[in-house]
Image: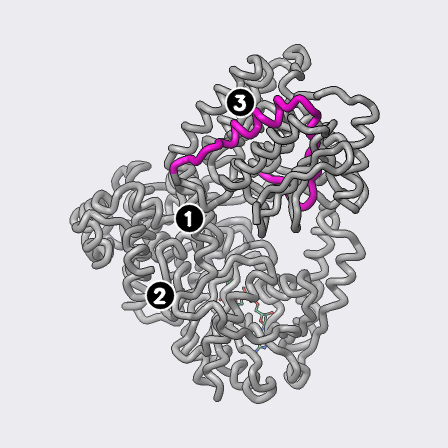
Amino acid sequence: MSVVTYQLQGDVGVIKVNNPPVNALSQAVRQGLKESLAQAQGDASKAVLVICEGRTFIAGADITEFGKPPKEPSLPDVLDALENSQKPVIAAIHGTALGGGLEVALACHYRCAVPSAKVGLPEVKLGILPGGGGTQRAPRLMGVEAALDLMTSGNPISAKKAAASGLVDKVLGDDLEKEALAYANELIAQNAPLKRVRDINIDPASIPEGFFEKARKQVNKRARGQIAPDRIVSCVEAAVSLPMDEGLKKERELFTELVQSPQSAAMRHAFFAEREAAKVKDLPKDTPTRDVKKVAIIGGGTMGGGIAMNFMNAGIPVTLLEINDEALQRGIGIIEKNYKITASKGKMTEEQVSKCMGLLNGTTNYDDLSDVDLVIEAVFENIDIKKQVFSKLDEVCKPGCILASNTSYQNIDEIATATKRPQDVVGMHFFSPANVMKLLENVRGEKTADDVVATVMKLAKTINKVPVLARVCYGFIGNRMLKSYGREAQLCLIEGATPKQIDDALEKFGMAMGPIAMGDLAGLDIGYKAREGLSDAEKGDPKSYKIADVLVEAGRLGQKTGKGYYKYDPETRARLEDPEVQEIIEKVAKDLGVERREISEQEIVDRCIFGLVNEGAKVLEEGIAQRPSDIDIVYLYGYAFPVAKGGPMFYADQVGLDKVYARICEFRDKIGSETWAEPAKLLEKLAKEGKSFGDWAKENA
Ligand code: NAD
């Protein structure tokens, strides 16, 4: 069946797109639109309606065509045909009209939408800009400021908001086809003109002086090194100052620049990597999953409370178990407070909050867990306590109940030995704050059953998380790699850099927060406590943790005590350099016999980031991660690695593995192998073969 059909219904020529699942703008759709439009020009129709079957209007470009040679007709050809139609063309929007989909609607003469519809231009999220006239038409319709916001945020807006801004002409009732036809007939009856968006001129005098400079500054501040938002500002500026055709030329020029940029390659990589990460290589697609209708959380502290909220938000009842009533009430109180904050920001209604809270039950009695389908343990990070908890769970939980641990470091296989059902034990490692952070690192134990793995991967979607699958090792994918990153930051600190130099360098690279400031945020006592359980050999080089130990022992635990590596302004929480810390650093360096020297910004970045990459390569060669792109997802969603760099492994590929390998060898030789771990075998092999992690992924798909 054709993906686009044309039929005359009374006076209206109806072009219907039917390209499931989301009516993507494939070559066949583009061609169908063009042909139907040509047909409409020659028949008795007085107006043309573009409408879609299924769950949405054209949702956007066809992602399978990404990176392939363009196929005729191009989107601009189709848009020209729509705009130059001799009969008014009306787009009828339902579902989500995004990107190229919305650009099709913008090239029409009128737009109507059902109330539930959403429209948006999300290209910026792939490091590009709307390249089908969107940057020229959106500001002409909705004004410069609203259009900039739409395109630089990439976030969709509701039909109502679109109508209020002028992007959509009419909000229909719920019955799409009937109401859209009525609107088309109404326009015919009014003899409505051919309202071409290109004919609208934006009066330059209406733009306040310095507006674009300010906008550029704002987007650059928000964008953490991304260039696309800046180019979008340039396009909108062109929409004001240049005639339409010249504006379109400018848009094409900047679009081409962005499409070819390493940033957009990185962001497209991230887009596909996210989809890939949810797949488990050795599990057939039809692996059965277990029903999860009721969940229990053990421990209502920082993590337990946040984890509980994820399930409550998804409408799944949660039983929270704590050691005593006091701890339980505290835990419930924190959850309640978090919801109140969300509601006060207007992100949830009071009604939604009470509905969620209604799904929460507290208990101190394990017998209340007998009917749950999944338990997530989030008690103190101590293997003995965790094993005690699992042994109790083994006694009370029904057969088939999944027993998960949110441990950051502990061995899932060892935890599983506390039960008689190791096949039901799995890691579900959430990130803090657990109700906000998108990453869910699921950890597959030696004996974890396939259907348990399939269930926790699928469950991630239900609670709106991005899952990645890891195998067991100390710290799994994310925290294990973080250790190398943190170690290099610590070494730079003791060898001569200040906390601020290190954080500035990595924040300039694009990390949301530098590693030293991150330590202060998380609390320096966490690492301190974790080290207490380790042997000297496991702790590694004292140069990599001694400063932190001294700070903790001096009561400087980080933000929560108002001071750590920095001191924090009690009012603004601004981080300030502290001479006392500098003294501590210098003393520890002296005690450990380290001669301090000047360390360049480049050295800081290379040591920390290549530290991640090197450990990532080890994680890969040991089979802890399934694919290099999974490691990228862990870092993008769990550690705020800059998306414009695609994740540490993709970044290393872009730098070139030969260069990365050479630089790691250089550090090892200069600084000594006791401080710089040996290059990973896999990294060495790929570098010498002139290959990338991407090549490895293809060979090991
Ligand atoms: P937390 O100290 O804030 O909370 C732990 C809670 O567990 C406390 O409320 C305590 O009363 C309760 N608890 C202790 N023993 C218990 C028992 N036997 N039965 C029932 N409840 C018990 O700790 P947290 O930061 O929420 O960490 C919990 C787990 O999550 C740890 O394994 C940690 O490694 C992991 N984790 C923490 C983070 C983080 O950033 N905080 C991130 C990911 C994973």
Mark drawn on residue 624: 2
When the figure is inspected, residue 73 is found, relative to residue 440, above or below; the finding is: above
Residue named by callout 3: 235
Along the polypeptide, which appears first: circle 1 or circle 3?
A: 3
Which of the pair 333/77 is nearer the observer?
Answer: 77
Relative placement, left or right, of 632 versus 173 is left
Q: Quadrant of ligand 1?
A: bottom right
Q: Pointer 3: residues within 10 angstroms few (<14), some, or many (20+)?
A: many
Residue 461's x, y, as percent? 57, 61
Taking the image as drawn, is residue 1 in sight?
A: yes
Taking the image as drawn, is residue 157 in sight?
A: no
Ligand 1 within 8 Å, label 3 CB: no
> Which-is-in-front pick, marks 1 and 3?
3
Mark drawn on residue 515: 1
Q: Quadrant of the C terminus?
A: bottom left
Furthest residue in direction front, as rendered = 43
